[in-house]
Amino acid sequence: MKRISLFFLFTLLGLRWLPGQTADSSAYRFPLDLPPLLSATFGELRPGHFHAGLDIKTNGKTGYKVYAIADGYIYRIKVQRGGYGKAVYIKHHDGKISVYAHLSAFAGDLAGYVKRKQYEKQRFFIELRLNENLFPVTKGQVIGFSGNTGGSSGPHLHFELREDEAHPVNPMRFGFRVPDTLPPRLVDLWFYPLTDSSVVAEGNKPVQGVLEKQQGHDYRMQAITAYGAVGLGIRAYDRQNNTWNKNGLYRVSMFVNGIKTYETRMDRLDYGRNRRINLLIDYPRYVHEHVYVQRLWKHPLAKLPVFTQLVRHGIVQVEPGKTYRIRIELADFEGNTSNVHAWIIGRKPGKRFEKHPQTYDGEVVDVSWTKGADLGDDAVRVHIPRHCVYDSTRIALVEDYLSFDIGLPEIPLNRRFRAAYSLKDIPPAKKKYAYLARYSERKGRYYFATARRVRDSLILNTYNFGHYKVFFDSIPPVISGLNIRNGQWISRWRYLRFRVSDRQTGIKSVEAYIDGKWILTDWDPKTGKAVYDFNDLGFDGSKHELLIRVKDRAGNTTEKKLIFYRKFK
């Protein structure tokens, strides 16, 4: 008996995910010839941004054909160190834009065009804007191959649909559906006192709800006492059929005494306001615990397109002697729902909570949404611009030898602030090796912080308050795994391969030359692997000199030279 492919089996079953089966069945096809198992959905909460597309699983492998979903033209190509890695952007005749990211390679003539431009600019990482007549595409045309490039943590295709360059939309609204009969699941529910006079469970700190019992798809929480302005927060996830991944929710609705007071829907995003996701989540909890609790109330500056219903910004104003019946509905795109039931009993607190003023070391300034600040001295200078912090807050700068603390890491920022650390007192022999690193309390270690060297200063532009320290890296990067030896004949070999690594600051750049001519090395920063295709260029004679030059992010350089023999066609 012949084996029936999964693709054919799904065809027989008539499932909605199949290519071409959309809200308008003639509009789009699926970008892969694979069942649509998702590792991430549109609008998932991420650090500093929403996930703007669908992550489609590729069986843990790379190299599957990726197809244009509709007629149009390729208008943008990007090869990026992180982010989307190798990506194709297509404008379609209906005005939509589709994006295909983390590709392992581009297809056909497009691959050759990108390579020529990389050689012209002598850069592997490149961004190209293309004329509409250069690469027209038809629906179902192969444009690339699935991969794991850029910031990907495993093989998959990241697929987006956009209204324009600034506004991604949920592909599920346009027919890219997946088999899903599973309702969302609740992890926990939180209650937050929102003002100095608010109280939850006789205290003035957030309180986690106590799960009383679970019945079907319903969750019930024990009643909790409160007073004043109270906000709720949920941590939850969704799963689709045939996959274990914990994905984001499509819709979250909250009802207070039967009235819908809050709702978010993941239909459309705005790249210009992406960072304001930090006002939608419990940001301090994310910083310290790396979990996402969605706040069920709206900060005044959280002007995000995901809000579809708000009464009093979603805040529950609790009065003594009254009971508030809360129902939170969690839904995925297919309409599978779970309900969370909770009760708040209004009770005036038996005691008052005195607000103890926080003490600060070092120089202190007050900043707000409309007011920035400058602080520091010749050793460290900090500039906090307007529209950097969301809420009025006090920021302290504390300087120490080779380190400084600025603000608190749990304060979310809308814009980068600038810190300039002077190196003038560091001995010249060490100065050139200096770099800045930021300390992560959650992970208990320092991470390289990208800073520019400007004369005798390190200039840092970052979204992160916290503790920074100067380190020194004088150890050059390592070149290893080179697949040719000095003096070797390699006429039958197609590829040059090697690895690069650096234990402290990481690799900044990889360059290679044959007989003094720049060659294109396809370098994967995640694995350190670099590959050159000997078919790219021709060289005269049979004796050739190879030079590999690798630089780390502290400026240390390693070079490797050797002679090899090869006759090029």
Image (cartoon, rainbow, N blue to C red):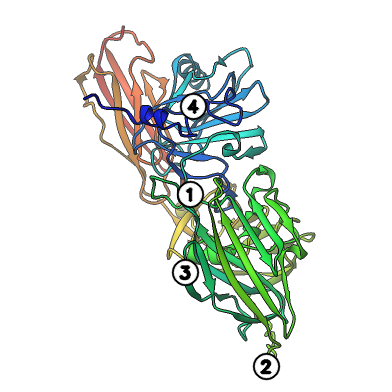
Relative height, residue 151 to residue 385 (above, below): above
Counting from the top left corner in percent of width and height, residue 557 is at 40, 39
Q: Which numbered mark, 1 or 4, is in the foreground of this view?
A: 4
Marks 3 and 4 sit apart, C-alpha to C-alpha, by 39 Å
Which three-letter amino acid code belongs to the residue tagged 4? Pro
Numbered circle sitting on residue 214: 3
Q: Are marks 4 and 2 in contact (CB under 8 Å)?
A: no
Marks 3 and 1 sit apart, C-alpha to C-alpha, by 61 Å
> Mark 4: which secondary structure?
loop
> Mark 2: which secondary structure?
loop
* Circle nearer the N terminus (1, 4): 4
Residue at image location 64% in from the left, 16% down from the top: 132
Q: Which of 116 and 9 is in front in this view?
A: 9
* Circle nearer the N terminus (1, 2): 2
Q: Residues within 10 Å of mark 2 (few under 14, many from 20)?
A: few
Which three-letter amino acid code belongs to the residue tagged 2? Gly
* Circle nearer the N terminus (2, 3): 3
Counting from the top left corner in percent of width and height, residue 559 is at 35, 34
Relative height, residue 517 to residue 227 (above, below): above
